[in-house]
Amino acid sequence: MTKFLFINGPNINFIGKREPDIYGNVTYEQLVKLIEEECSKNNISSDIFQSNIEGEIIDKIQKSEDVDLIIANLGAYTHTSIAIRDAFLSVNKPLIEVHISNIFKREKFRHKSFISDIAIGVISGFGIDSYLLAIYAGKKYIIEKRGLL
């Protein structure tokens, strides 16, 4: 079975509680359930991980040898962490960058991502549906490029 790793960075666990005008009202627990259900429908095994700690995220990336594709919403680390970028480069796994909000409609400092150029694609601004779009895009990528599904 194909396996996708979902990595969620700092404060993603607080969606539904923080800034609902930006992140909506869906809680992190509801998001996890939605991802699990959508992956199951598409015959994809999901490993969903969240941490507010940069080193834990790096450790999770480095232990992703059994993963076919990574979908990452790094939160603020998107714009600050070269170490996480280096971790992605070290494992050489296909990566899709995801954001709930449209980072290009937000503060200027959020317009720079340290992982966009190493990702196969970026999905931004569709609320939690950004994750569903990433699942579909990831599945298509795996089918076309690797023939694994």
Image (cartoon, grey):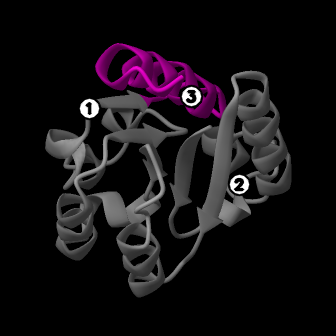
The residue beneath circle 1 is 120
Against 3, residue 139 (above or below) is: above
User: Is residue 68 found left or right of 114 in the rendered image?
Assistant: right
User: Is residue 53 found left or right of 61 in the rendered image?
Assistant: right
Residue 65: image location, x then y, percent:
40, 62
What span is in magenta?
124-149
The residue lying at 72 percent from left, 46 percent from top is 20
Amino acid, disc 1: Ile
Against 50, residue 72 (above or below) is: above
Q: CA distance from mark 2 to mark 1?
A: 25 Å
| Residue 64 numbered tag | none
Q: Quadrant of residue 29?
A: bottom right
Secondary element under disc 3, as helix, strand or loop, is: helix
Q: Magenta segment, principal secondary structure?
A: helix
The residue beneath circle 2 is 15
The residue beneath circle 3 is 135
Q: Residues within 10 Å of mark 1 (few under 14, many from 20)?
A: some
Q: Residues within 10 Å of mark 2 (few under 14, many from 20)?
A: many
Of labels 3 and 2, earlier in sequence is 2
Q: Is residue 115 magenta?
A: no
User: Is residue 77 found left or right of 114 in the rendered image?
Assistant: right
Amino acid, disc 3: Ile
Q: Which quarter of the rendering shows the C terminus?
A: top right
Against 9, residue 103 (above or below) is: above
Q: Is residue 136 magenta?
A: yes
Could you say which is closer to the camera, residue 103 or residue 134?
134
Q: Which quarter of the rendering shows the N terminus?
A: top right
Of labels 2 and 1, earlier in sequence is 2
Secondary element under disc 2, as helix, strand or loop, is: loop
Secondary element under disc 1, as helix, strand or loop, is: loop
